[in-house]
């Protein structure tokens, strides 16, 4: 029951997916070939792995051969990223049919992902999703991992989301999107792709968690003392956030939060569905022995700008809603105290019309650190998802860059020749402008 | 009751071998989901149907192998003997040196009468070995010379001599792009003759099976061996034993009679197709789980959208709403052609088979107006799983799915006929233009009857 399908689109989605599933396997004691270890004592952390009754049904499907196959689909329009998984450490974990790759990629072009190359793969993708959905007895919804800036991540995901909405209209769709960083960019046409995809996916996604590379680079550099953070470190952090979000579905806890509860509590209006993610504690392995943060420390750290996975200063906006997901050695009394402390702090401002702005989830299973990764193993951790009007800054930034390029009609011909029209660009930009105004209106209160 | 298989021609012999191999492997496959006693009953039933016992304990397939050239038969016999698990009877084969030259007329008018007596003797001997005969299963292709021509002749003979037994012909539809230039002529003549003398025609299209190999089994270089194995898998899942009734635990005694009864209500409609789900490569099998609901949903959509495999199904096709004219009455060129069935038989094998819900198949919109779903739809079940698949379902259906390929073949043959190409090869051996015209007329009639369901 309460199964959740993960769909990983494009290179970013696939690589984040690889990190996430690696972490899930570690947490559940599943070996790289899909077979589960039962109650073996883990020497490294001195903690026992899960008792066999822990419900991993929601993310893994058990086959008659004793394998636990992830309920996931990896999609890309070119084979390199998916081949990395096919030849990587976890190659025997995934069903061969779940790793779908095309031959010709979207070349960082939304139009190719959406209109020319994407439609060739969409039917196959939907078939696979249908098959996965049939194996579920109570599908809650989908978690979609993608980036905004790429061609597949933007274009193909828009196409996919539209189709999923028609076919699975009552299921939640939660996105984890890699937003283009303010000062670092990996593609010149990022603003185009991002705005086009945000416009087309806006009505189909129920909740979109934003992360950006620059914020995570800074975290890795300053807090984890990693000199040269690679994508592996970044994906490791993102996977910790994702793991905390889904922990309630996979483990028992005092206060469970499932996917639909997120939506209900975080999204006051259908278009206002872009919460910011932050994690605490972010400690490197050396510091862990000196520090074991308490619940109040964790909560305070969460609301700081430096722990956020997106470069948006929450101090400049007001909070609409906030979801705190604790895991590990946490009791509700500490949580209440911590929230009180947070509420009284002047830097944390809530809108007038939402006095009880907190949703709390507690899972008893502590976080696991990937061996060889940068993070330390701690006894408790928290992930905060906050719907704040500060995210307007992110959209404004993106819109500004879009405007600069569009004014000169730069790079537009690449989109036009794949069948798009200028009208779509203006429409998308207007939609974003309206979104910004919506956020401002909401933030002002009654 | 036993089934005697007659393997004709290169195609028939190669497929026949794979079928027996699949049947044998399945019956000796280690089972996890049913009791030992049940497994033994299954094995005994399978053996009785397809194999007979000989002194040295190696089961002998109940088959007669016929070909007009020696190469394939020798290969088949030696492959079976080498496997050590089962074999063909030492004297159950007939082969000649010359071959039939891909010529239907040669197979029918020359080889037929010439070898009639010897072949019927061989069949007689096989029949005598059976305690009770259920019927004949004749494996042949339509495109070649022996399988098609000799097969047609033989079926007619069996009709005369064993009029009480049933005959089911397994026909292989050639690739649309063509394997043999005169395949269309051979096909027309075969089909028209068989329609008169056979009881049911179970058709497998090479194109469809090829796609299954490519897409589902992920085989890169597809050989005829792969195609034959997929085919054998499909046939095996139809012919292996199943319970004889709802709630019963005894295995069905007479499969051919039951098949005909369930699927061929009217002699005008004899063409049957098989669809099997799931079908995948060995590697994928370890990662997969199945639910009856999912399998049956796909199977039903495969039926109504006329898809032959579980990928690439057109989910847009829906049964017509009652009160509106059925889409089936529209011309064949219409894209969203809904596949109306006359009768369907679903065969379920595997774990928890009694919990499977088949309500979707009993929808009257799927069937033609002159047959109630109660009569038109049947289910056979067994708890014992087939081969390595924990749950598998096969659908044998008498439906409009073969109308389009048949129409294409008739069209192509007519084009050739209109220009009188290659006709002399046939008239040389006594097949006149009238025979061709008769054949065309009969098949046009069949197409018309099916289209007007």
Image: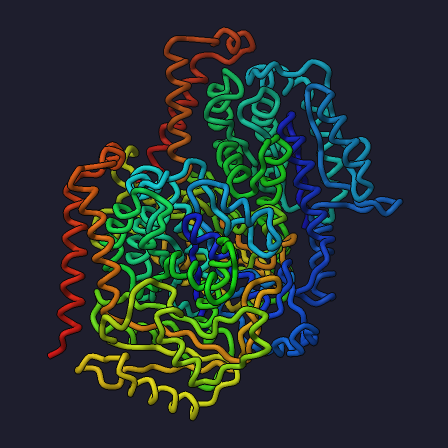
Give the vertical position of B205 relative to A357 (above or below).
above
Is residue B287 toward the left or the right of residue A124 in the image? Answer: right
Is residue B239 toward the left or the right of residue A273 in the image? Answer: right
Residue at 47% in and 89% down: A331
Q: Position of residue B393 (x, y in %)?
A: 53, 54
Count of all numbered marks drawn on residues in the image: 0
Residue at 48% in and 57% down: A17
Give the vertical position of A190 relative to A18 (above or below).
above
Q: Position of residue A136 (x, y in %)?
A: 46, 65
Q: Position of residue B101 (x, y in %)?
A: 61, 14
Residue at 71% in and 53% down: B27
Q: Position of residue A188 (x, y in %)?
A: 31, 42
Residue at 26% in and 67% down: A273
Q: Camera-side residue: B14 or A181?
A: A181
Give the vertical position of B14 relative to A432 (above or below).
above
**Residue at the farthest bottom position:** A333
Is residue B374 toward the left or the right of residue A47 in the image? Answer: left
Q: Camera-side residue: B419 or A187?
A: A187
Instruction: Check the picture and name the quadrant holding the C terminus of chain B.
Output: top left
Q: Hey, which quadrant is residue B45 in on the image?
A: bottom right
**Residue at the farthest left position:** A446
Q: Would you say residue B220 is visible in this rendering?
A: yes
């Amino acid at each position: 029951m309460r199964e959740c399908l993960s769909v990983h689109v494009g290179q970013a989605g696939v690589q984040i997916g690889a990190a996430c599933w690696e972490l899930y396997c570690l947490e559940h004691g599943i070996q790289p070939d899909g077979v589960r270890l039962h109650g073996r004592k883990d020497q490294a952390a001195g903690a026992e792995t899960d008792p066999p009754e822990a419900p991993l049904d929601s993310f893994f499907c058990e086959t008659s051969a004793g394998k636990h196959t992830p309920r996931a689909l990896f999609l890309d329009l070119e084979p390199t990223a998916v081949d990395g998984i096919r030849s990587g450490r976890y190659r025997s974990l995934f069903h061969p049919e779940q790793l779908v790759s095309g031959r010709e990629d979207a070349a960082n072009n939304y139009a190719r992902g959406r209109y020319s190359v994407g439609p060739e793969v969409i039917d196959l993708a939907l078939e696979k999703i249908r098959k996965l959905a049939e194996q579920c007895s109570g599908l809650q919804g989908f978690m979609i991992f993608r980036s905004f800036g790429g061609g597949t991540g933007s274009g193909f995901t828009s196409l996919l989301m539209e189709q999923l909405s028609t076919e699975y209209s009552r299921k939640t769709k939660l996105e984890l999107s890699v937003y283009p960083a303010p000062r670092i960019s990996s593609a010149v046409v990022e603003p185009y792709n991002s705005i086009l995809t945000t416009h087309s996916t806006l009505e189909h996604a129920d909740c979109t968690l934003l992360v950006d590379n620059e914020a995570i680079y800074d975290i890795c550099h300053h807090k984890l003392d990693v000199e040269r953070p690679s994508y592996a470190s970044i994906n490791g952090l993102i996977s910790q956030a994702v793991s905390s979000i889904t922990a309630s579905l996979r483990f028992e806890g005092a206060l469970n939060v499932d996917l639909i509860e997120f939506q209900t509590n975080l999204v006051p209006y259908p278009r206002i569905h872009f919460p910011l993610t932050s994690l605490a504690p972010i400690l490197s392995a050396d510091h862990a022995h000196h520090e074991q943060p308490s619940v109040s420390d964790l909560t305070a750290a969460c609301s700081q700008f430096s722990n956020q996975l997106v470069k948006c200063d929450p101090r400049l906006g007001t909070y609409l809603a906030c979801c705190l997901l604790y895991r590990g050695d946490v009791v509700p009394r500490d949580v209440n105290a911590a929230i009180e402390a947070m509420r009284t702090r002047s830097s944390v401002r809530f809108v007038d019309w939402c006095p009880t702005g907190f949703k709390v989830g507690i899972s008893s299973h502590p976080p696991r650190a990937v061996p060889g990764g940068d993070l330390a193993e701690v006894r408790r951790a928290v992930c905060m998802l906050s719907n704040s009007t500060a995210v307007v800054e992110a959209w404004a930034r993106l819109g500004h860059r879009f405007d600069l390029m569009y004014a000169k009609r730069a790079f537009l011909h690449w989109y036009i020749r794949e069948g798009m029209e200028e009208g779509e660009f203006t429409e998308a930009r207007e939609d974003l402008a309206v979104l910004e105004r919506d956020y401002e209106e909401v933030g002002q209160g009654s | 009751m036993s089934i005697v298989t007659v393997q004709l021609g290169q195609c028939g012999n190669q497929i026949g071998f794979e079928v027996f191999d699949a049947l044998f492997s399945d019956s000796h496959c280690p089972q996890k989901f049913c009791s030992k006693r049940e497994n033994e009953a299954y094995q005994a039933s399978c053996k009785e149907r397809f194999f007979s016992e000989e002194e040295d304990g190696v089961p002998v397939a109940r088959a007669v192998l016929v070909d007009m050239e020696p190469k394939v038969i020798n290969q088949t016999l030696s492959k079976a003997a080498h496997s050590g698990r089962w074999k063909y009877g030492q004297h159950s084969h007939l082969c000649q040196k010359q071959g039939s030259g891909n010529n239907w007329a040669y197979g029918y008018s020359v080889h037929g009468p010439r070898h009639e007596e010897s072949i019927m003797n061989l069949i007689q001997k096989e029949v005598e070995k059976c305690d009770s005969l259920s019927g004949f299963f004749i494996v042949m292709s339509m495109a070649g010379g022996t399988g098609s021509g000799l097969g047609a002749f033989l079926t007619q003979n069996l009709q005369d001599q064993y009029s009480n037994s049933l005959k089911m012909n397994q026909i292989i539809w050639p690739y649309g792009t063509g394997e043999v230039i005169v395949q269309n002529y051979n096909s027309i003549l075969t089909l028209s003759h068989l329609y008169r003398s056979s009881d049911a025609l179970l058709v497998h299209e090479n194109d469809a099976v090829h796609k299954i190999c490519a897409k589902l089994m992920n085989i890169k270089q597809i050989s005829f061996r792969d195609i034959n194995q997929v085919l054998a898998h499909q046939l095996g899942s139809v012919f292996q034993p199943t319970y004889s009734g709802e709630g019963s635990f005894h295995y069905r005694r007479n499969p051919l009679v039951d098949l005909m009864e369930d699927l061929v209500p009217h002699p005008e409609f004899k063409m049957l197709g098989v669809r099997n789900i799931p079908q995948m490569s060995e590697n994928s099998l370890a990662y997969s789980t199945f639910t009856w609901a999912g399998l049956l949903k796909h199977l039903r959509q495969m039926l109504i959208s006329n898809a032959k495999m579980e990928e690439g199904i057109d989910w847009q096709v829906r049964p017509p709403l009652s009160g509106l004219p059925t889409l089936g009455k529209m011309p064949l060129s219409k894209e969203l052609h809904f596949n109306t069935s006359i009768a369907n038989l679903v065969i379920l094998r595997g774990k928890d088979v009694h919990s499977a819900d088949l309500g979707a198949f009993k929808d009257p919109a799927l069937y033609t107006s002159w047959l109630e779903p109660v009569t038109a739809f049947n289910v056979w079940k067994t708890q014992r799983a087939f081969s390595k698949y924990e749950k598998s379902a096969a659908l044998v259906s008498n439906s409009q799915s073969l109308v389009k390929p048949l129409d294409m073949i008739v069209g192509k043959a007519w084009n050739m006929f209109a220009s009188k190409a290659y006709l002399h090869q046939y008239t040389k051996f006594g097949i006149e233009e009238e025979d061709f015209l008769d054949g065309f007329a009969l098949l046009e009639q069949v197409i018309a009857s099916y289209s007007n369901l």
